[in-house]
Amino acid sequence: MDEVLKFLTDNKVFYLATVNGDAPALRPFGFAMKYDNKLYFCTANTKNVYKQLKANPKMQISATSPEGKWLRLNGKAVFNTSKESQEAVLNTMPMLKNMYKVGDPTFETFYIDQADATFYDMQGNSHNVKF
């Protein structure tokens, strides 16, 4: 998990795909953290990403580095919002305090379960990490 988190944080913007009915839905994300020994993300429950993950928790993340390496991460979203997880998010990325505060009823945290990550490079090499 640490290798995945490092790749996501080193490459600031990554893309999270969900299932929207029978079509994929993709959007940029920029926050990930290790919390309670899990890889966590956050969103608002007013957003389509939240609604889509609640309807179908399957998700995929893709990120690319300037050096031509990339990551594909598959798993299932598990929402597990608490004041402690919200506080951890805001401590990890203080700029999110402009959007959320601890106890905000729209502020949701979730982690990826059954995570299966594959790292690739332009030479055709790859390696897999599961957590």
Image: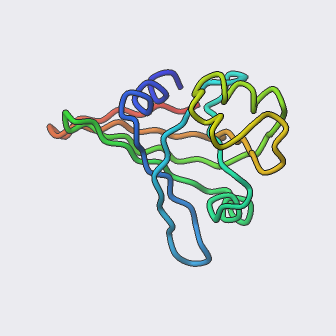
Assign the C terminus to one quadrant of the image: top right
Q: Pick the residue in front: 75 or 33.
A: 33
Q: Is residue 89 left or right of residue 71?
A: right
The outermost residue toward the front is 98
Residue 124 place in picture, x, y as percent: 19, 40
Residue 1 place in picture, x, y as percent: 53, 26
Query: Which residue is found at the position 75% from the left and 36% from the top?
Result: 101
Q: Is residue 51 left or right of residue 121?
A: right
Q: Is residue 34 left or right of residue 55?
A: left
Query: Which residue is found at the position 57% from the left and 28% from the top?
Result: 93
Residue 54 place in picture, x, y as percent: 74, 60
Query: Which residue is found at the position 68% from the left and 58% from the top?
Result: 50
The outermost residue toward the left is 123
Residue 80 place in picture, x, y as percent: 79, 40
Q: Quadrant of residue 39?
A: top right
Q: Quadrant of residue 56?
A: bottom right
Q: Quadrant of residue 109?
A: top right
Query: Which residue is found at the position 67% from the left and 59% from the top?
Result: 53
Q: Is residue 39 left or right of residue 25?
A: right
Relative to 74, say whether 101 is above or below.
Answer: above
